[in-house]
Amino acid sequence: MDVFEAIRSRASIGKVLPEPVDRALVEQILEAGTWAPNHHHTEPWRFFVLTGEGRKPLGRVMAAVAAAKMADPESPENQARLHNEAAKALRAPVIIAVSAHPTDKPNIVRVEEVAAASAAVQNMLLAAHALGLGAVWRTGPATLHPLTKQLFGLGPEDELVGFVYLGHPDMQAPPRHRIATTDKTTWIDTDQEHWQ
Ligand SMILES: Cc1cc2nc3c(=O)[nH]c(=O)nc-3n(C[C@H](O)[C@H](O)[C@H](O)COP(=O)(O)O)c2cc1C
């Protein structure tokens, strides 16, 4: 697939089939992630591939994060909500959690490490699309929660940039819209004397 076509036709696919995805395809997608640009060659991305029963701890953490915000998590209606929350981790046969592990050196800029891990996610979304798979980058309240970091053994300096939910598509790509680049872009082709 041509790169422009891949970029333009990729869409977030939130509904996928429960059937597993071949490990070789998942490995191809991870490989695409590792070719993202990164400053100082730090390669800050870390991937956690959750499949089958391995998705359940994430579901439990998502439910625990939701429960912590409830006045009465034990009420029957909240118990049903928490059950649904835990089931969210089963929406796709594969979930790839992506974190950034900033290199501990004085010249490393933390936000650049997160940017590089985010670029890895985009590479993975494009690779999944090129392979005919459906994927969506999800975050949500659990992403920034210490319990989730603990689940993946992350340190306080690490950042979870999100979860790639992956599977064989069970929906058509929805229509997508973007604001014209002209509304987002300033071309500067003369000297701006008021700029220092
Ligand atoms: C950092 C980030 C977090 C996102 N989190 C969610 C999410 O929690 N749930 C969701 O359905 N989509 C999430 N998305 C996907 C966006 O909703 C999606 O990219 C947007 O609607 C544009 O659609 P497209 O990807 O099909 O172009 C996230 C995207 C990014 C970049």
Image (cartoon, grey):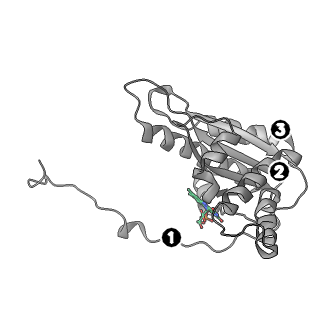
Above or below 124: residue 171: below
Q: Earlier in the sequence, mark 3 or mark 2?
A: 3
Q: Residue at x 45, y 71 (%)?
A: 179
- Horizontally, is 77 left or right of 179 in the view? right
Depth check, mark 1 against mark 2: the one in front is 2
For residue 56, the mark is: 2
182 in relation to 33, above or below: below
Q: Position of residue 22 (x, y in %)?
A: 87, 44
> Outermost residue toward the right?
19
**Residue drawn at the location 66% of the way across and 63% of the way down:** 11
Q: Secondary structure at mark 2?
A: helix
SS type, badge 3: helix
Disc sitting over residue 24 in the figure: 3
Left or right of 56? Residue 164 is left
The three-letter amino acid code for the residue at tag 2 is: Lys
CB-based contact (under 8 Å), mark 3 and mark 2: no
Q: Which amino acid type is shown beneath numbered disc 3?
A: Ala
Task: Choose top left, top right, bottom left or bottom right for residue 194.
Answer: bottom left
Disc 1 marks a residue whose amino acid type is: Arg
Q: CA distance from mark 3 to mark 2?
A: 23 Å
Residue 154, by quadrant, is top right
Residue at the disc numbered 1: 178
Mark 1 residue CB less than 8 A from any atom of ligand 1: yes
Q: Is mark 3 within 8 Å of ligand 1?
A: no
Label 3 crowd bin: few (<14), some (14–19), many (20+), radius 10 Å = few
- Give percent across and percent down for residue 80: 81, 71
Task: Say which label, 1 or 3, has the lower sequence index.
Answer: 3
